[in-house]
Amino acid sequence: MRIEAGQVMAVTGGGSGIGRALALGCAARGMAVAIADIEIGTAQETARLAEAHGVATLVREVDVSRGDAMRAFADSVYDRFARCDLLCNNAGVLVLGPLGDARASDWRWAMDVNLMGLVHGIEAFVPRMRAARAGHVLNTVSLRGIVTSAGCGVYAASKFAALAVSETLRIELAADRIGVTALCPWSVDTAILASDRNRPGEGGGLSAEAVQRLIDAAPANDLTIGADVVAAVAIEAVEADEAYAITHPRARALIEDRFHAIVRSIERVAARHPELP
């Protein structure tokens, strides 16, 4: 789809980081912006910044892990604007630590937000987008939805699932002329390392001290890019109707290593078992 003035975008997790950058990037193109975030104050600040571009905004406090909250958000978007051209399922949380130390609460939180938050966005918005036979869905996944590493197994599992949803949705919505893009950033300068601040219940994951050490170390990471750069890559991918928006060219080697390992496994099985189809 071509992003242009008069259209409407809706973004979850729009109060900061990639979500805010997506909102402002679209506002600069003249799109009205509907912002959902669990932190209403940050969402209101995003709206204020978007309005500087002369566009209309809508702000709602939304916990994406709740289907009823996402449905209410979608209702408010259509009541106000009567359309949604670009749905950005962006809200996400980070759970770090060895899998052997992960608790059921870690798994529930990651899956409730990173996977079910995306699912709830699809349920709330996509039927009306299909009725209009137009639009695009941008799902913020992660490079960790393609390749994983030690210490992020819970997070990666939720993001692998999110990527599967995105890829399947792209196939299923093609006939309705609705595109789907999986945004797969690597290291980005956002507040996701501090996402435990919004964790319900008893908490878990890394200690506050360990998280702070990660935050302090992040600026020195030569892979880290700004959220505005990620948003620019994402918007380009949406306009080109690309299935993936991968923000770091240096990720190519990691991705190739994974898929080459899979192909080599197939080749070994084929050599050992020529009778297999």
Image (spheres, grey):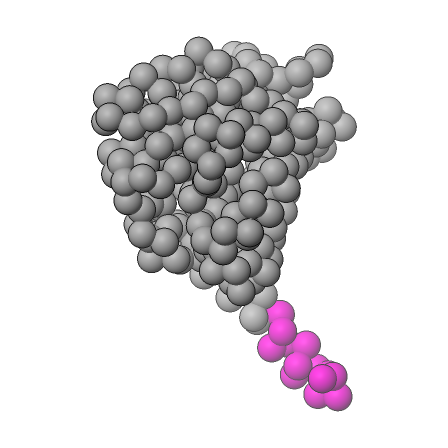
Q: Residue at x 32, y 17 (%)?
A: 48
Residue 35 to residue 178: above or below: above
Of all residues shown, which one is farthest toward the bottom?
Answer: 275
Q: Position of residue 266 (x, y in %)?
A: 63, 74
Q: Determine which quarter of the picture holds residue 110.
A: top right
Residue 19 to residue 60: above or below: below
On the rendered image, what quadrant is the C terminus found in? bottom right
User: Would you say 218 lies left or right of 100 here?
Assistant: left
- Residue stretch rendered in magenta on the structure: 265-277
Q: Looking at the image, can residue 113 be seen?
A: no
Q: Determine which quarter of the picture holds residue 227.
A: top left
Q: Residue at x 28, y 22 (%)?
A: 51
The kind of secondary structure the magenta stretch mainly shows is: helix
Q: Determine which quarter of the picture holds residue 149.
A: top right
Q: Position of residue 61 (x, y in %)?
A: 53, 18
Q: Looking at the image, can residue 44 be seen?
A: yes
Q: Position of residue 24 (x, y in %)?
A: 30, 30
Q: Residue at x 27, y 36 (%)?
A: 30
Q: Residue at x 66, y 16 (%)?
A: 200
